[in-house]
């Protein structure tokens, strides 16, 4: 819960260095408004994302995780996002199967020139996660830690 | 003595005598009834220890990695599929292994047999065709072996080894494609029910990693659960850590798992480990049309891609 009393989700956003991070940068430079719910972690490529990163984020109290990379065919490393897409398809399906709330983990493609699209993605992701409320399923309490959900809610 | 046992011994004898292999890896009688254990035969005079029965359930491909000598491996369907994956992943060289293929009619789930006789002590077991004659201190019972197979053996569609250098016995008719009806049925449950079931299963886990150690395809020098810097997964048996362990373990086997059930039968706590593996088997087949351990040529689905892979799950504003 924030100081003014309304709950805002904390979303970990893994953005690839070459497209989505630059897209987020463009959104900022262009002064496009989007919800301040994301905490960006810059990664070299969406192919760098190990499912463990996503699960560890949820364990440590993130309400949602967004992974974003270059559009297919536009990867700086040529095929990183293609490999990532296969991993994500399986992970998304597996998490849904175990009964994790489906919208907690989301994926998107945003290019460096799509500042407006980035803002819209964050809006959409935030709205979905807001509808779910605070994450409880995988959260592991870390008392006193920066992710201590008990202290913040 | 069954025909398969006799033929396996003959094959092993020839291979060792002619020095074609330095070691034969197969099964011998365990110290208790209803059990066979892996054995390593290095001398032709020892081949009579080898047996083949309905308890030769362990996946022997597990013993191939990091081996230097030339090996002859007694190989059933699932062992051969694990072997194919290991060859593809450059963990085993094809030239190093002589595959003694054994068509497999399914392995017997010991726990079910023990439950059938009310957990009374069984002292002797005799197998003939489809009959299993049990003898205990004060009872005798004859069972139909087909009713006591492992679940995975019932749905197995690779009973014959997918590759072999020599074959013992005769090839069996394959049952046809696994329909994954169990996965579909589970998926049809409410989300809360699925979560409740899997968290209960994860709750049984004591994090002994027997499932990982038994898996023929878990050969990483350092497993993600053992790394301490960074420590990706907590060491606790808390629900969150355990579930993450099981999810990632299953995920690391996506497109590699050959459904041999080694994990499940190694588990001392009876965790339904295959629940997650089965889901990934189904998805890999449905999304990427791939079945692990069937062909030496086809690339692993997560090591390749296609431009039109499914992506309807992506956020599109």
Image: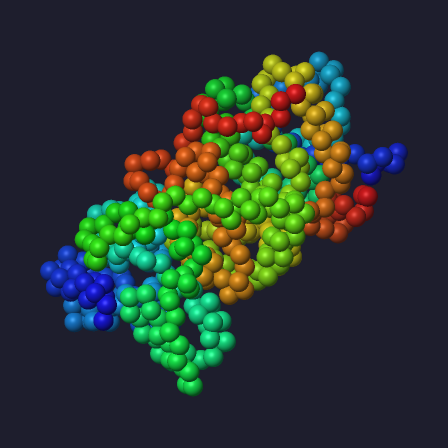
Q: Residue at x 54, y 34 (%)?
A: A88
Depth order, front residue of A106/B226: A106
Q: Residue at x 20, y 69 (%)?
A: B47
Q: Residue furthest left?
A: B18
Q: Residue at x 52, y 51 (%)?
A: B275
Q: Residue furthest bottom?
A: B138
Answer with left or right where residue B194 lies relative to residue A4: left
Residue B13 in the image: state x and y as whole percent.
15, 65
On the rendered image, what quadrant is the C terminus of chain B found in?
top right
Q: How many marks?
A: 0
Q: Residue at x 74, y 22 (%)?
A: A34
Residue B199 in the image: state x and y as whole percent.
63, 54
Answer with left or right where residue B194 lies relative to residue B114: right
Depth order, front residue of B129/B75: B129
Residue B68 in the image: state x and y as whole percent.
26, 55
Q: Is residue A17 visible?
A: no
């Amino acid at each position: 819960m924030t100081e003014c009393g309304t709950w805002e989700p904390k979303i970990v956003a893994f953005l690839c260095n070459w497209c989505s991070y630059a897209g987020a940068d463009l959104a900022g430079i262009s002064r496009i408004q989007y919800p301040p719910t994301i905490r960006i972690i810059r990664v070299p490529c969406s192919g760098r994302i190990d499912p463990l990163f996503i699960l560890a984020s949820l364990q440590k109290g993130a309400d949602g995780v967004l992974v974003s990379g270059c559009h297919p065919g536009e990867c700086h490393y040529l095929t990183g996002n293609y490999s990532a897409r296969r991993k994500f398809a399986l992970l998304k399906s597996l998490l849904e199967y175990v009964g994790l709330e489906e919208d907690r983990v989301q994926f998107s493609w945003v290019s460096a020139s799509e500042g407006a699209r980035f803002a819209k993605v964050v809006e959409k992701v935030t709205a979905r996660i807001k509808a779910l409320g605070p994450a409880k399923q995988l959260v592991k309490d870390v008392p006193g830690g920066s992710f201590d959900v008990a202290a913040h809610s | 003595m069954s025909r398969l046992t006799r033929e396996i011994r003959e094959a092993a004898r020839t291979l060792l005598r002619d020095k074609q292999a330095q070691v034969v890896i197969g099964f011998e009688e365990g110290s208790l009834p209803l059990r066979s254990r892996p054995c390593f035969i290095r001398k032709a005079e020892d081949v009579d220890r080898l047996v083949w029965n309905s308890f030769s359930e362990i996946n022997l491909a597990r013993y191939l990695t990091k081996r230097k000598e030339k090996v002859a491996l007694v190989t059933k369907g699932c062992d051969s599929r694990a072997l194919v994956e290991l060859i593809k992943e450059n963990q085993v060289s094809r030239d190093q292994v002589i595959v003694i293929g054994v068509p497999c009619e399914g392995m017997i789930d010991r726990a079910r047999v023990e439950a059938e006789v009310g957990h009374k002590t069984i002292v002797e077991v005799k197998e003939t065709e489809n009959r299993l004659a049990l003898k205990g201190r004060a009872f005798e019972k004859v069972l139909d072996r087909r009713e006591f197979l492992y679940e995975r053996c019932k749905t197995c569609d690779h009973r014959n080894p997918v590759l072999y250098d020599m074959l013992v016995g005769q090839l069996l008719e394959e049952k046809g494609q696994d329909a994954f009806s169990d996965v579909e049925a589970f998926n049809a449950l409410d989300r809360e029910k699925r979560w409740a079931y899997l968290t209960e299963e994860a709750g049984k886990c004591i994090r002994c990693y027997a499932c990982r150690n038994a898996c023929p395809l878990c050969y990483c020098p350092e497993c993600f659960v053992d790394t301490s810097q960074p420590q990706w997964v907590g060491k606790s048996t808390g629900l969150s850590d355990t579930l993450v362990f099981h999810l990632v373990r299953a995920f690391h086997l996506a497109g590699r798992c050959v459904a041999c059930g080694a994990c499940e039968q190694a588990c001392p706590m009876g965790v339904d480990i295959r629940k997650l593996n089965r889901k990934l088997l189904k998805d890999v087949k449905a999304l990427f049309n791939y079945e692990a351990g069937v062909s030496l040529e086809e690339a692993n689905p997560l090591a390749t891609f296609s431009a039109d892979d499914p992506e309807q799950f992506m956020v599109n504003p």
